Amino acid sequence: MQERILVIDDEAQITRVLRASLTAQGYQVRTANDPEEGLEVFREWSPDLVIVDLMMPTMTGVDVCRSIRLLGAIPVVILSVRDHERSKIEALDAGADDYVTKPFKLQELLARVRAHLRRAPQRSSPIIEAGDFVIDPASHSITVAGSPIHLTPKEFDLLVFFARNTGKVMTHRALLTAVWGAQSAHQPEYLRVFIGQLRKKLESETGKQYIQTEPWVGYRFIAEGWKDAQEAKDESVG
C-alpha cells in the first residue's frame, strides 16, 4: 500500500514541487494551501506523515501540529524560514518530529521523510520488555510499571532506542543519528526538548528517574528506574 503524505503550505509553488517530487517517489500526496483545509484533509484522509509550513496567515504550523497531536500520533515535519533555536524548540515542544529550514535541499527533505516513515511501527516488531517497561512497536503502545503512557512518534522512537540499549551510555550523536537520521547529528536542541518531555511523562507516572545525564557525553537509560524523582531534584537543589 502506498504511504500517504499531506503537505500544508500557503506557498503554491512549494506544494506543487513537493506534490510532484513525493509522487515521483511513489507516495500518495494531497496538498492544502491553508491550515484549516489541511486539518480537514487530515481528518478525512488519515495520512501517514504531514509536512506543514510554520508561518501561515490564519494559523501557525505549531498550532496545526498541536491539533494533529489531539487527533493522532503520526510524524509531523515543520518547514520554516526561521532558523532560530527558539523556533525549533517551540515546534518540537508542540509535538513536531522534525524541523527543516527553508530554502531546503529537496533530496534532504525526501531523506528525512523516508527516515520518519521507515521508523513507523512495523507489524512484525517484537514486544520489548525491559525493567518497568513493556513496549509494543506494532501498536505504538507503552506501559510503565503497569500504567499506559501517551508519547508522540519521536518520543516513542527515542524511548524504544533507549529500551533496546538499557544501561549503556548513548552519546548525543548516536541518539540523534538513530532517531532523527545522520542529517540531524549536529542538532542537540532536538535531544534537549525530547529528553525533557520524556522525563516529565515518565516521572509523572512513577515518581522514578529513568534517564540519567552523562555530562558532556550523552544519556544512560535505566529501565528499572532508580531513586524517587522528587528526592533527586531536591538533592540537586541542595
Image: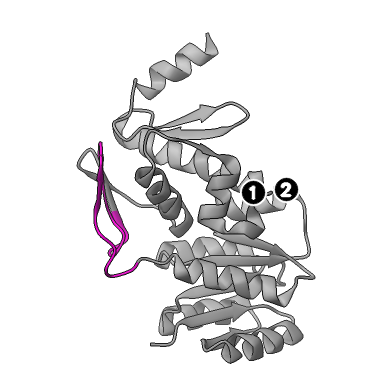
In the image, 52: left or right of 168? right
Secondary structure beneath dot 2 equals helix
The main secondary structure of the magenta stretch is loop
| Residue 63 in the image, given as x and y percentages of width and height | 58, 62
Crowdedness near tag 2: few (<14), some (14–19) or many (≥20) residues, C-alpha within 10 Å: few
Residue type at mark 2: give it: Glu
Q: Which of the pair 139/36 is nearer the observer?
A: 139
Q: Which residues are magenta?
A: 122-141
The residue shown at (64%, 80%) is 34
Asked whether the residues under the numbered discs 1 and 2 touch, taking CB atoms below 8 Å apart as contact, a structural biologist would say yes
Q: Is residue 58 something that shows in the picture?
A: no
The residue shown at (62%, 57%) is 182
Check residue 190 in the rendering and tell me which mark sits there, or answer none: none
Snapshot quadrant of residue 103? bottom right
Which residue is disc 2 drawn over? 85
Marker count (numbered): 2
Residue type at mark 1: give it: Ile
Snapshot quadrant of residue 133? top left
Determine the CA span between mark 1 and mark 2: 6 Å
Secondary structure beneath dot 1 equals helix
Q: Is residue 145 something that shows in the picture?
A: yes
The residue shown at (42%, 35%) is 168
In the image, 89: left or right of 201? right
Check residue 89 in the rendering and tell me which mark sits there, or answer none: 1
The residue shown at (59%, 32%) is 217
| Residue 51 in the image, given as x and y percentages of width and height | 59, 73
Crowdedness near tag 1: few (<14), some (14–19) or many (≥20) residues, C-alpha within 10 Å: some
